[in-house]
Image (cartoon, grey):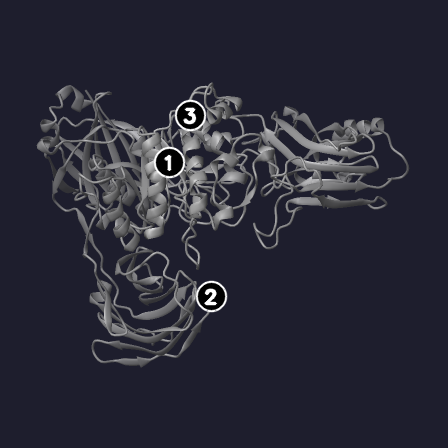
């Protein structure tokens, strides 16, 4: 027999809620820009990669040099009179004679015969450069690929054979472009070509249009001479709704979410690691050759082929309002030295840069220079910008306030129609959060950007997080959030929390899961909303939850109370074991463990080098409900700290104590953790050699934790043992005339939800009760779902009859009931 819940709606508690609530946030992380959303297949086509990107990278990263036996070729790098001073490097190919003089006609003959080469003759007869793309290039039968290159031939015209090479080196398409002899001024010439792969090459198998997954672009130099090359490009012609330069299947995955807004370009990308890495929007528009490349804070490269103009076009195409985010005159705080401000003498120019973005988006192209640039790129009409973010996860100190206030005041004065979104740090608690909110209230910032990455248990435990938010202060934008993993339980925890965000949509104005994209094999963060490789797109459970909300947006919500079994109480293990992990360096001395019954264990000293985990030799089978850990910890380096994990550390439920970037006590539940309490701050660098006397008291199998540093209590955490796992929320789209009842059942038994009072309070007619569309996301295993893969199940829809007022919610499910009328 199913459990039973009785739902009661408070009609007097009606709230008008934001219709811009559900959106997306794009940051170029995990190769989500170049190699991902950017449809460009050539990696490092501008020859601008260098050690700032990665220590092992150079100007020829992703290029393979081919010099057949008996030929001569030297491939160098030049900087003299480049195509664009912003990106000064280019390739120089010096080709010697290959078996005597050859002519352009002979080169054309070779190109014409290239497709008839056998697999044993796949190596070019002349020197060549091959670009390997991003994990190879995927080629599809019937697709046309647009190729372009800037060239400068020395002395005489030189042909270049351009070929698409399939798996195993098989040529799939080829053509010849000829670089004209450069004049005395050494001018560059851009050459273009199109290459179409014959549909006849398709294999009559599923997904047959893909005929190469490890393809390459080959440039062969059949004539002796010297030629300069730059800005090599290859893009498939297929687009999503004519949106050029974007990978269509990834855009389609975004469009299917129906986001009301899109935040971009970051995130930490926005303010970068130092002033030279700061994101300047005006350097990302105009001809791509003149967009200066830069290193990516997540460890790769940004070509800015997708810049601010392209972001706005993407928003327009998928029907999302743009929410660009600009630095608050500060670089990222997440370095050992902390944030660096724009010098005051440079602030007027920087403020002009900020105001210029608004003009670029909204001004008349006939009268404004920035708007004229927009028109020159092909968009005469304004982009109708409403929101502008200033700052991201900044350290809230006096310098930040000074810089932010200057920008904020300038925007208000020049553009009162723009709603500014501020920032309150990287977490839903702590120093930046408290100080950020205090400053936002003082300054009158309309909306503040909160971030929260947590375990599924935290989301369930904190469903009331926004219930008591000050309705007279700034509104909330939860700009980055997610449950730590891609399992069904993570999606259900987000669904439950999102229902309460919707109820509090009068103060929670916007929300966007983060990160948005991640390329398999290159993930910098987990989890992510959409995974992909060169061939496919993969949607985890969280994607479907976002879609279920964003496709059923509402403008009104009511509180609902539940009577019946709604909570989970875990049976926590009493196992006691210890390990050290984390990325910092620290020494541990005078290490000991003592249980409540008096068992005392001395542990060896540990010199921890940030290469954990390191297990401690605790006697096997040791069990205790309460125990105390002591150690003298000498901290050397590493801003993210070290952690002492305790309890059943090889299981899914245990405890952790973090030392370094502040101090905190944590619980790990179902494999992911969250802080119960602490003094974690943003960027307090610890001097090498700092020593702490640490005492950790664990009670009731980990439900209580106390942390003492040098005898002083710094963190006192208590976990509520009952975790809410069943929720019902109600909202309505008055324009469409649809009421949405959302039911989360994150427990192993189905539950009968009595909705009779809710339906009566909303005056739902019997005819509407009889035909209700139920969209259900469910599965048998709450821990199913692997990072980087498609979710094992996805939402399904069917009709249900609520004439008797009861809906049976399956175990481990999220349901949206749509009642029309």
Q: Earlier in the sequence, mark 1 or mark 2?
A: 1
Q: Nearer the viewer, residue 90 or 121?
A: 90
Residue 817, compared with residue 296, is above or below; it is above
Count of marks overlaid on the render: 3
Would residue 211 appear left or right of 69 to someone viewing this image? left
Residue at mark 1: 24
- Secondary-structure class at tag 1: strand
| Foreground: disc 3 or disc 1 | 3
Q: Percent from the top left, x then y, of residue 522?
A: 51, 47
- The image quarter containing residue 165 is top right
Would residue 317 appear left or right of 815 to someone viewing this image? right
Q: Percent from the top left, x then y, of residue 817?
A: 23, 30
For the N terminus, which image quadrant?
A: top left
Res. 611 mark: 2
- Secondary-structure class at tag 2: loop
Q: Percent from the top left, x then y, of residue 573?
A: 26, 64
Disc 2 to disc 3, C-alpha distance? 46 Å
């Amino acid at each position: 027999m199913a459990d039973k819940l009785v739902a009661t709606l408070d009609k007097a508690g009606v709230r008008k809620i934001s219709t811009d609530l559900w959106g997306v946030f794009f940051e170029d992380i995990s190769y989500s820009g170049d190699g991902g959303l950017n449809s460009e297949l050539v990696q490092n086509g501008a020859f601008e990669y260098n050690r700032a990107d990665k220590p092992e990278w150079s100007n020829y990263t992703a290029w393979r040099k081919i010099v057949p036996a008996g030929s001569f070729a030297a491939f160098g790098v030049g900087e003299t009179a480049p195509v664009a001073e912003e990106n000064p490097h280019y390739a120089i190919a010096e080709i010697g004679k290959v078996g005597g003089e050859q002519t352009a006609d002979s080169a054309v003959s070779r190109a014409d015969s290239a497709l008839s080469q056998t697999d044993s003759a796949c190596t070019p007869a002349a020197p060549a450069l091959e670009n390997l793309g991003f994990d190879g290039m995927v080629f599809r039968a019937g697709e046309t690929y647009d190729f372009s290159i800037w060239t400068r031939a020395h002395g005489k015209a030189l042909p270049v054979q351009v070929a698409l090479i399939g798996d195993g080196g098989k040529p799939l398409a080829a053509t010849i472009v000829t670089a004209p002899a450069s004049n005395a001024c050494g001018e560059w010439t851009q050459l273009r070509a199109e290459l179409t792969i014959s549909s006849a090459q398709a294999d009559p198998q599923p997904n047959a249009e893909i005929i190469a997954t490890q393809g390459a672009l080959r440039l062969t130099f059949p004539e002796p001479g010297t030629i300069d090359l730059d800005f090599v490009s290859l893009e498939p012609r297929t687009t999503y709704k004519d949106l050029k330069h974007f990978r269509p299947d990834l855009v389609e995955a975004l469009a299917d979410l129906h986001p009301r807004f899109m935040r971009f370009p970051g995130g930490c990308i926005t303010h970068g690691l130092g002033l030279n890495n700061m994101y300047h929007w005006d350097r990302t528009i105009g001809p791509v050759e003149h967009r200066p490349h830069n290193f990516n804070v997540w460890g790769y490269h940004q070509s800015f082929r997708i810049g601010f103009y392209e972001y706005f076009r993407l928003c327009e195409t998928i029907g999302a309002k743009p929410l660009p985010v600009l630095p608050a005159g500060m670089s990222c705080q997440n370095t050992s030295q902390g944030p660096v401000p724009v010098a005051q003498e440079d602030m007027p120019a920087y403020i002009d840069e900020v105001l210029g973005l608004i003009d670029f988006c909204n001004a008349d192209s006939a009268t404004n220079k920035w708007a004229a640039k927009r028109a020159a790129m092909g968009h005469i009409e304004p982009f109708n910008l409403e929101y502008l973010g200033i700052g991201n996860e900044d350290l809230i100190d006096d310098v930040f306030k000074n810089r932010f206030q200057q920008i904020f005041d300038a925007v208000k004065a020049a553009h009162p129609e723009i709603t500014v979104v501020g920032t309150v740090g990287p977490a839903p608690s702590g120093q930046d959060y408290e100080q950020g909110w205090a400053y936002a209230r003082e300054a009158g910032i309309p909306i503040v950007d909160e971030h929260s990455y947590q375990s599924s248990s935290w989301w369930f435990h904190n469903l009331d997080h926004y219930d008591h938010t000050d309705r007279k202060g700034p509104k909330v934008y939860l700009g980055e959030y997610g449950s730590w993993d891609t399992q069904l339980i993570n999606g259900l925890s987000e669904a439950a929390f999102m229902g309460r965000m919707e109820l509090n949509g009068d103060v929670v104005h916007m929300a966007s899961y983060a990160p948005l994209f991640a390329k398999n094999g290159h993930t910098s963060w987990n989890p992510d909303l959409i995974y992909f490789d060169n061939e496919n797109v993969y949607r985890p459970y969280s994607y479907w939850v976002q879609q279920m909300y964003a496709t059923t947006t509402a403008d009104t919500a009511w509180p609902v109370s539940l009577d019946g079994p709604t909570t989970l109480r875990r049976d926590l293990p009493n196992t006691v074991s210890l390990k050290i992990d984390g990325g910092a360096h620290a020494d541990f001395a005078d290490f000991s463990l003592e249980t409540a019954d008096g068992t005392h264990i001395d542990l060896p000293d540990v010199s921890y080098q940030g290469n954990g985990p390191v297990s401690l030799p605790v006697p096997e089978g040791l069990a205790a409900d309460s125990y105390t850990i002591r150690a003298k910890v000498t901290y050397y380096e590493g801003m993210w700290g070290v952690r002492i994990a305790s309890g059943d550390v090889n299981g899914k439920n245990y405890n952790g104590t973090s030392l370094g970037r502040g101090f905190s006590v944590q619980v790990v539940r179902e494999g992911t953790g969250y802080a119960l309490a602490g003094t974690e701050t943003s960027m307090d660098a610890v001097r090498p050699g700092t020593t702490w006397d640490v005492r950790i008291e664990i009670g009731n199998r980990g439900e209580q934790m106390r942390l003492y540093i040098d005898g002083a209590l710094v963190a006192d955490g208590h976990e509520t043992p009952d975790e809410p796992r069943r929720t019902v929320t109600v909202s309505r789209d008055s324009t469409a005339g649809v009421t949405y009842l959302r039911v989360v059942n994150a427990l192993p038994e189905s539950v009968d939800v009595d909705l009779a009072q809710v339906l009566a309070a909303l005056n739902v007619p019997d005819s509407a009760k009889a035909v209700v569309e139920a969209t259900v996301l469910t599965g048998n295993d709450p821990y199913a779902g692997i990072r980087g893969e498609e979710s094992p199940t996805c939402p399904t829809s069917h009709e249900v009859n609520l004439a008797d007022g009861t809906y049976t919610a399956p175990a481990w499910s999220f349901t949206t009931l749509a009642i029309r009328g």
